[in-house]
């Protein structure tokens, strides 16, 4: 039986992330893009279905390259609203240590649903909390990803350096190295998919220099090399972290990264704010990627990532919303807007364009995750598409549709297609009772805080 061909026809505007033209839309077959059409052009062969996109701006499915799904349960919690990173973490760690599989499942579903509605088709989550009873946290997340039909890079995070040994996390949140490595290997063997169209992938992600030992960093790098998966961690987020590395290891952050075998193209880092010019050059030469998290960096007053210098040096740049306790949202199109504005403060309006910010949120993030099959609209790429309408009051009077997405604050996709299947139609996630999810999630959030 012949595969169904779908023509997404004549969009209002298109961002392909690769400078190709698709003014006439594109054709999807077997979950991939098989044609890009110029203005007035028709498909080479008949299509069984079509969607008239004349009122829609068409984007590649956006890619969130750093998140902490579980944090949707601790948004806007009063005791940490005005705290910087280290005290913020110390206050929240005991709360997060009370996570259960049921609460994690709800938190994950809320984060993914919010991302999906914001135009995101693929998300990387950095989960590093495995208190008693939550040993199968990543398994829980895999089920939710599959339920919503999204793609995910689920990272097996870890914390092995507790307060008793000079780290930040409380002892009930840390694990022994052999437990971490054994579970990492299990998850890769059980869930990691390879090749074009992969839905679930696994990466290894020791949390940060102040919460894991150098031994687990080195062992994770060796295991990632052996099993050919990616590496992820937080680095150079704050000056406090830099001071910690100097005092504990006698090294600045990039020197420390190099000393444990992480400085290379397999690695992508969250935040990457406090680098000097020599460190930027080393990161670029190594091909190590950086996920810029503007809202979180502003909320915690951590600083501004030097994106332009990093990208010029050769380091891929992507975008992440970071956790919902430091961003307080999981909205990737709004994160692209925030990146546009924050980076303009550093580099000026001429250099930081809407197209650059959208590129970080699509093709750039795909590079961080080691994927060449998503993040752009091109023949042979996965049919992951976001379609946005500009019919709300906020867009009235706007002239350039692509710029209007960010400058006028688009926050919700009208339609989302992932792998050729519609997952959002008319702003609603197919098959999801959103009201019930919100009610269950709110109850879980109150219970977590109450203890």
Image: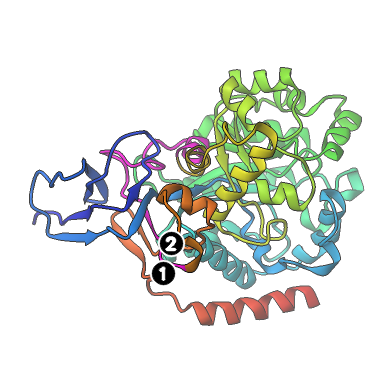
Q: Residue at x 24, y 52 (%)?
A: 10
x and y, in percent, of residue 312 in the image: 58, 22
Q: Quadrant of residue 420?
A: bottom left
| Viewer-nearest residue: 242 or 328 | 328
Q: Is residue 182 visible?
A: no
Residues in magenta?
363-392
Snapshot quadrant of residue 305: top right
The residue labelled by disc 2 is 413
Quick check: marks 1 and 2 in contact, CB under 8 Å? yes
Residue sitting at x 22%, y 54%: 9
Relative to 399, is 97 on the left or the right? right
Disc 1 and disc 2: Cα gap in Å?
6 Å
Residue 303 is situated, as x and y percent measured from the top left of the image, at 76, 40
The quadrant of the image that shows the C terminus is: bottom right
> Residue at the location (74% across, 23% down)?
259
Q: Is residue 390 magenta?
A: yes
């Amino acid at each position: 039986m012949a595969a169904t061909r779908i023509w997404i026809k004549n969009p209002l505007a298109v961002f392909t992330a690769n400078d190709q033209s698709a003014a006439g839309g594109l054709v999807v077959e077997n979950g991939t893009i098989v044609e890009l059409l110029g203005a007035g052009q028709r498909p080479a062969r008949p299509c069984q279905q079509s969607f008239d996109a004349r009122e829609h701006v068409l984007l590649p499915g956006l890619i969130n390259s750093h998140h902490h799904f579980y944090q949707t349960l601790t948004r806007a919690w009063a005791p940490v609203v005005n705290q910087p990173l280290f005290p913020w973490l110390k206050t929240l760690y005991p709360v997060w240590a009370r996570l259960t599989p049921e609460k994690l499942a709800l938190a994950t579903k809320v984060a993914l649903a919010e991302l999906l509605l914001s135009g995101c088709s693929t998300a990387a989550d950095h989960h590093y909390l495995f208190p008693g009873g939550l040993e199968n946290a990543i398994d829980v997340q895999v089920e939710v990803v599959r339920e919503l039909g999204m793609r995910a890079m689920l990272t097996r995070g870890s914390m092995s350096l507790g307060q008793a040994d000079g780290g930040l996390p409380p002892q009930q949140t840390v694990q022994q190295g052999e437990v971490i490595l054994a579970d990492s290997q299990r998850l890769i063997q059980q869930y990691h998919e390879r090749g074009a169209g992969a839905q679930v992938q696994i990466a290894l992600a020791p949390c940060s220099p102040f919460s894991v030992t150098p031994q687990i960093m080195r062992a994770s790098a060796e295991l990632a090399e052996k099993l050919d998966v990616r590496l992820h961690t937080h680095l150079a987020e704050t000056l406090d972290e830099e001071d910690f590395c100097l005092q504990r290891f006698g090294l600045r952050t990039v020197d420390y990264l190099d000393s444990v075998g992480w400085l290379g193209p397999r690695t992508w880092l969250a935040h990457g704010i406090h680098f000097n010019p020599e460190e930027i050059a080393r990161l670029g030469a190594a091909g190590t990627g950086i996920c810029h998290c503007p809202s979180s960096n502003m909320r915690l007053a951590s600083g501004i990532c030097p994106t332009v210098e990093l990208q010029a040096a050769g380091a891929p740049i992507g975008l992440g919303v970071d956790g919902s306790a430091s961003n307080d949202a999981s909205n990737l199109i709004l994160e692209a807007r925030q990146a546009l504005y924050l980076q303009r403060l550093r580099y000026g309006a001429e250099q930081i364009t809407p197209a650059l910010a959208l590129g970080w949120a699509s093709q750039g993030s795909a590079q961080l995750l080691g994927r060449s099959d998503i993040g752009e609209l091109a023949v042979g790429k996965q049919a992951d598409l976001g379609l946005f309408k500009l019919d709300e009051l906020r867009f009235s009077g706007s002239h350039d549709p692509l710029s209007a997405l960010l400058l006028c604050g688009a926050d919700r996709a009208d339609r989302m297609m992932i792998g050729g299947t519609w997952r959002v139609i008319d702003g609603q996630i197919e098959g999801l009772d959103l009201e019930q999810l919100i009610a269950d999630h709110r109850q879980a959030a109150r219970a977590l805080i109450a203890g």
